[in-house]
Amino acid sequence: MTEPFFTLHHRDPSCRARTGVLALPHGPAATPVFMPVGTNGTVKALTGDDLEEIGFEIILSNTYHLYLRPGTEVISAAGSLHGFMGWQGNILTDSGGFQVFSLAPFRKIQDEGVIFRSHIDGSCHTLSPEKVVEIQTVLNSDIQMQLDVCSPWETEYKAADKALKITAQWLTRTKYAWEESVRKGYQGKLFSIVQGNFYKDLRKQSAELAVQADTPGIAIGGLSVGEPAGVFTEYLAYTASLLPLEKPRYVMGIGTPRYILSAIEEGIDMFDCVLPTRTGRIGHVFTRQGAIALKKSENRLDFAPIDEECGCKVCRNYSRAYLRHLFKTQEILCSMLSSYHNLYFIHDLVKQARQAISENRFVSFKEAFLQRYTENTRGA
């Protein structure tokens, strides 16, 4: 008997929060799960051993960037992205749609696909739904995403509707190409993506199309693209309510404690963001009392760890004063240690959330954490 892709373990009766497990080619992944972002086949400033030590079971890499550099020929010769980067855990790859969206001056969207110019050398390329499946299959992604059209906050209705319709057309072609690759032995799963911008009728229409496509999982796209926090929360809850319970749900691009906990409360199983490592590289670190900036003068003679309650190796071995010194002298080690701590912090937060769900106390856990975190946030 084939093991189901997603097994739901427990639902907290006080909200939509739930725990489960994803059965993936490179091992199971407990949910809810935060995925560190390794855009170019590396999570910046960390090694694969670091990620394994923290406890990550799945990371994210980017199709657009890997397609441009080093290219599929190199990764194919290495056997897979896993072999190329020396990571034996699972890898989810995004489709490149968001990167194309963010490079608006250099791209043109057509029914056939996206024509764009490389941000590296200006060369012209085309990404079609079929091409994106082909690239992700070469990467041997454990989970791959469909090519979609992401529209920014305050997009007019007509443009949002057009983006939705193109995304829906591309999903049909994507699924066919993915099914062909599966018939040839590929084992990775496919996620469709819900778009619709910030129009509830379009969100509903897009969610219905994603459900009808019956892909193994469904992602919620087009959130955290510049909208106010209240709008994010509203549309996250609304979109999540439209999706089937039996499939894993993924919200792309969220990495703050508040957004992560809000997503978990609405029954979201997966999320990713560059924020923990990006902010770590500029000396901003998470603590249970709020985020802090290491560069602040108050840390010059502070020999306490970043977070007294954190069990990571950074907090066990280094002080705020030392980390501030590393930051001020622009030592690479500051980026490495700060990024490690931030990812450990987020991983531990999600792990605690899973425990709270299993004990039917997620809402009180979230409220207690955010009250403490928000009230004391300073310097970051």
Image (cartoon, helix red, strand yellow):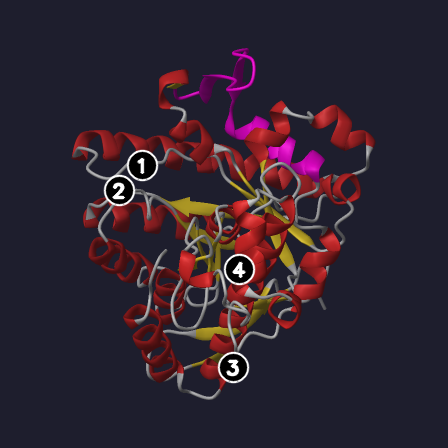
Pointer 4 residue: 342
- The mark nearer the N terminus, 4 or 3, is 4
Given the image, on which type of amino acid does mark 4 rest?
Asn
Relative to 106, residue 315 above or below: below
- The mark nearer the N terminus, 3 or 1, is 1
Pointer 2 residue: 197
Given the image, on which type of amino acid does mark 3 rest?
Gln
Q: Which residues are magenta?
A: 110-139
Residues under numbered marks 3 and 1 in contact, where contact means CB atoms less than 8 Å apart? no
Pointer 1 residue: 164
- The mark nearer the N terminus, 4 or 2, is 2
Given the image, on which type of amino acid does mark 2 rest?
Asn
The one nearer the camera, 326 or 14, is 326
Tell me the quarter of the picture where residue 380 sits: bottom left
Picture coordinates of residue 206, whole percent (x, y): 32, 45
Label 3 element class: helix
Q: Which one is closest to the eye, mark 4 or mark 3?
A: 4
Residue displayed at 45% across by 21% down: 114
- The mark nearer the N terminus, 2 or 3, is 2
Picture coordinates of residue 313, whole percent (x, y): 66, 68
Residues under numbered marks 4 and 3 in contact, where contact means CB atoms less than 8 Å apart? no
Picture coordinates of residue 257, whole percent (x, y): 40, 64
Residues under numbered marks 2 and 1 in contact, where contact means CB atoms less than 8 Å apart? yes
Residue displayed at 35% across by 57% down: 379
Disc 4 crowd, CA 10 A, few/some/many (<14, 14-19, 20+): many
The one nearer the camera, 339 or 282, is 282
